[in-house]
Amino acid sequence: MKFRADKTDIKRYVEEGWWEASKGLAEFVRENAQRNPSGIAYRTSESQISWNEYFHAAMGLAEQIKRETTKGGRILVWLPDCPDIHICYLACEMAGVVTVGVGWKAGLQELKYLSEVTGASILLSKQNNPLGKLDDISEYLNLNSLSLEDIFSNHIVDGEGPNLEGSIGPSDLWFLNSTSGTTGLPKCVMQTQNRWFYFHKKAVEFGQLTEKDIWMSVVPAPFGFGLWTAHVTPTLLGIPCLLQERFNALEAAKEIEKHQVSVLCAVSSQFVMILDASSNIDLSSLKVIFTGGEAISPTRAQELEEKSGCRVLNFYGSNETGTLSGTTVHDPSNKRYTSGGKVIPEMQVRLYDSTTGERISDIGKGQPACKGPALSLGYWEDDDANKQLMTEDGWFMMGDLVEIDSQGWLKVTGRVSDFIIRGGKNISAVAIEREVELHPKVALVAVVPKPNKKLGETAAAYVQLHVGQSLSLHELQNFLRKQGVSIEWWPETLNVLESLPLSSGGKVAKGELKELIKSEERNQ
């Protein structure tokens, strides 16, 4: 397992201008604080923080972190999407400590798994959180805890703080975040700053971004889309970023109008909800919306563009690979709505036969793979998963089936991996099945995606019960709640069948269940 990008790659990508040789986010924030100390770095509907306050708050927290752990250690950062979460991420970087980003909706099981698999020593969170008291949770996890309230009430924000020479370098392991795995357990993706610096450059190019933009990101910060849209790009541009602790479509629309937001970052289901909530709100300040994570509705994208005058753009890729392709403000609307854009040359996109694993023509249909400056370092301490993710010569595989035409336009046509894409987040169907099958009434379970107008997809559970038993959705969800299962993993539809359909190989025939859902949709 490597904790730093390959030396050859570093040299090449620095020379090509995609990566930084030594400069990390902390240095960019310091420059923003020196150049524009009172300028707004982050803003919510209730508070705001300047670049100077952001930098010095992170410096003070970094001092505390250095006293509590050692360089190269891991800290679980579990916070809602507010300025505090970015202060903590920056402080960990300054202290030379790897951040383990955890979604605010995580359940106890996910927290425990992430703490164990990463070897984290500290849980950094609020004293009161969705699962109870911080002290009780940290005791359950067998971790030391740092309370945000205690830290920010005690530290000095105008001191010099630690020397930035101890910060994590741009090509070093900087951040671990979870992604769903087809084996059912979350996997931790090893992030460097440089991969997101590259991604930022493509966003600036494709969206024609400038230092005059006003930014809003309503995507959870710990995950790939949230990292570059809330933690990286606003800092590199030196512009204010609006956040929401809890997504609210109406309030987001009001904030766009109030602060004249020009760039919105949201998964497709979120921008649709914002559009639906904005009938009496002016969105004309928007010039670009970056979306992704799920299929774009051409009709709704067109409605939003006609209402606001913006361009709806998306990148195609994953938390592991970064971007393989993307749409630009200059692309025709039919391509922006229905494709993942043109493949990016420096990402060296290839196609493979999804059945045999053999490389095929790079024009046509197949399973895509890539190798370039947007790649992560792979999975943390998971050799088997890394072997599935990467080819022997270092190309990272996607879990989709795509078609690439002779001009380089990429279109997703299907999926190899067993995921539900709920609100832009990949959730393993296998992971949900393993939780549902623990219910004492359940004999057999299969989970498949069900189309949803707002979220893209939700989890539909088909169960075969033990003889003489009955089970309601409410009863199942209460069971999962008591088990500490994250809410996002709860099935939102439950179908009880006398027996589940089986394939010739003896496996549950999920294709038949998906056809049942399609039939139900047609009959509604």
Image (spheres, rainbow, N blue to C red):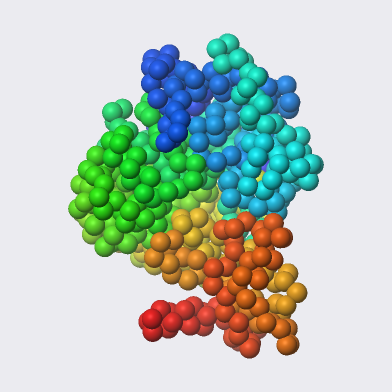
Residue 462 appears anywhere in the view:
yes
Position in image of residue 390 (x %, y %): 56, 53
Residue at image location 38% in from the left, 81% down from the top: 524
Res. 61 image quadrant: top right
Please state if 1 lies on the left or on the right of 34 as rendered. right
Position in image of residue 348 (x %, y %): 41, 49
Res. 135 image quadrant: top right
Position in image of residue 267 (x %, y %): 41, 52
Residue at image location 25% in from the left, 50% down from the top: 280
Please state if 135 lies on the left or on the right of 223 as rendered. right
Residue 22 appears anywhere in the view:
no
**Residue 47, placed above or below residue 320:** above
In the rendered image, the quadrant that contains the N terminus is top right
**Closer to the camera, 464 or 506?**
464
Residue at image location 59% in from the left, 34% down from the top: 174
Position in image of residue 220 (x %, y %): 50, 45
Please state if 335 lies on the left or on the right of 155 as rendered. left
Residue at image location 56% in from the left, 16% down from the top: 157
Res. 338 image quadrant: bottom left
